[in-house]
Amino acid sequence: MAETVRIISPVDGRVYAERPVATAAEIEAAVTRAKRARMAWGALTVPERGAAVTRFLDALLAMNPEIVPELAWQMGRPVRFGGEARGVEERGRHMIGIAESALAPVRPGAKEGFRRFITREPLGTMLVIAPWNYPYLTAINSIVPGLMAGNAVILKHASQTLLAGERFAEAARRAELPAGIFQNLVMTHSDTERLIGSGVIDHINFTGSVEGGRRIETAAAGTFASLALELGGKDPAYVRNDAIIEHAIENLVDGAFYNSGQSCCGVERIYVHESVYDRFVEGFTAYARTYTLGDPLDAATMVGPMAQPRLADVVRSQVAEALRKGASALLRTDDERDRAGSPYCAPEVLANVDHQMAVMREESFGPVVGIMHVKDDDEAVTLMNDSPYGLTASIWTTDADRAAALGARIETGTVFMNRCDYLDPGLVWTGVKATGRGGALSEIGYHHLTQPKSYHLRQV
């Protein structure tokens, strides 16, 4: 019997979908098709590719009414939030719009008797390994600019969100993209690592765990394929004494609990100046109570189940350890669904926390946040940097100059002021330390998806 992958829905624990795993022959055929297709695709002008990729994006967006409930069934996101269409469209159209200028030849200046310029050539065949937490947004970051840069793209989606891969493939079919230029494959981890190690993949984009990133690096060793890795995070926020407290509360509650806390750049720890700490904690706790746990298919639900029971158990274990070490749980929601072995995990706010607790040091990736008071900016920066990760950090203040100065001292890929949990496609999306390497979106994102080629032409 052929091996299959099942989606176990967090809504009710039943099998929502099941798909066969690609055979070795099917994987090899996909690679062959990609290599054949990319030659003609790369020869098109950027505007020609842009027209085709715009059709692809439009086709994907047109499926959103069906995608929204699928997301609820696959990974638990409440339907009230409307899926990921808005961000997908913003990022996709931005990257299509800047492609011609971002990919234009670089001319170093006139030099008598010579023509000199640098072109940006496609890398070849890309493998995009997409995660389940934002199955469309994370994938679009690589798929659209990858295609626009002239590459062929093979998508391997997370087993929890297999149907997202099928939606991308259907969009490519409706847009009449050239056969083989975009393909979706269902693969096991071992088959994926084998494909990476074969040397036929030129670039790998992976979003997932730190351990997953290490396995990708090991598999790619010696192939000279380029890597883009977005891995773990423990994103901090700092509320200064001059912050607009109500604004900070509303946005940080959302940043901590949206998508059940399963956001790459979700806020997992908050540091608050001691002079406004009590006021902030009181307001934050009151507002967090409005983020109720429930059925993601109910339009009133704010927080759905986590994608898998084991992930919810990690959050529960971190909360339990923090309480044993002296933390205070401020919500203490009494929901019978929130129990060991269940994907339903109610939001929790912890006070009296410190960096001896896992909840303030280790990735939670769920609906829990710890809040600490600090005496000044220096203490806040020290604690924000006390982490193996560095994806985003947010500063809540009315002083933009001070925010920029503090941001220069924080070890992170993105510094926010008075906002969080958002990707601006005009800015590069990157991380430092164990969060990964490479960069997506913006003009710099195109630099990671192309190979520079120099032309030094002498007149004689």
Image (spheres, rainbow, N blue to C red):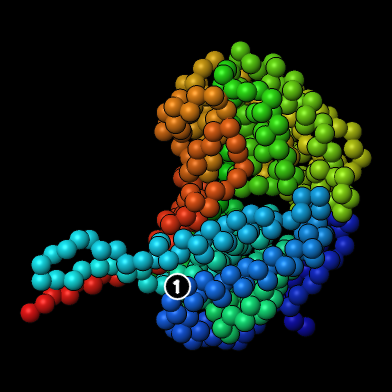
**Horizontal arrangement in the rendering, residue 238 relative to residue 44 (left or right):** right
Corner quadrant of residue 170: bottom right
| Viewer-proximal residue among 251 and 349 | 251
Residue 180 vertical placement versus 434 (above, below): below
Direction right: furthest residue: 336
Seen at 90% across and 38% down, the residue is 335
Quadrant of the rendering where the C terminus is positioned = bottom left
* Image x and y of residue 319, in percent: 74, 33
* Image x and y of residue 263, in percent: 65, 47
* Image x and y of residue 389, in percent: 52, 42
Disc 1 is placed on an element classified as helix
Q: How many marks?
A: 1
| Viewer-proximal residue among 201 and 249 | 249
Seen at 77% across and 50% down, the residue is 81
Q: Residues within 10 Å of mark 1 (few under 14, many from 20)?
A: many
**Horizontal arrangement in the rendering, residue 333 relative to residue 359 (left or right):** right
Q: Amino acid at mark 1?
A: Val
Seen at 70% across and 17% down, the residue is 279
Quadrant of the rendering where the N terminus is positioned = bottom right
Corner quadrant of residue 110: bottom left
Seen at 69% across and 25% down, the residue is 246
Direction top: furthest residue: 275
Residue 432 is at least partly visible in this image: yes
Q: Which residue is mark 1?
A: 46
* Image x and y of residue 188, in percent: 65, 71
Corner quadrant of residue 199: bottom left
Residue 236 is at least partly visible in this image: no
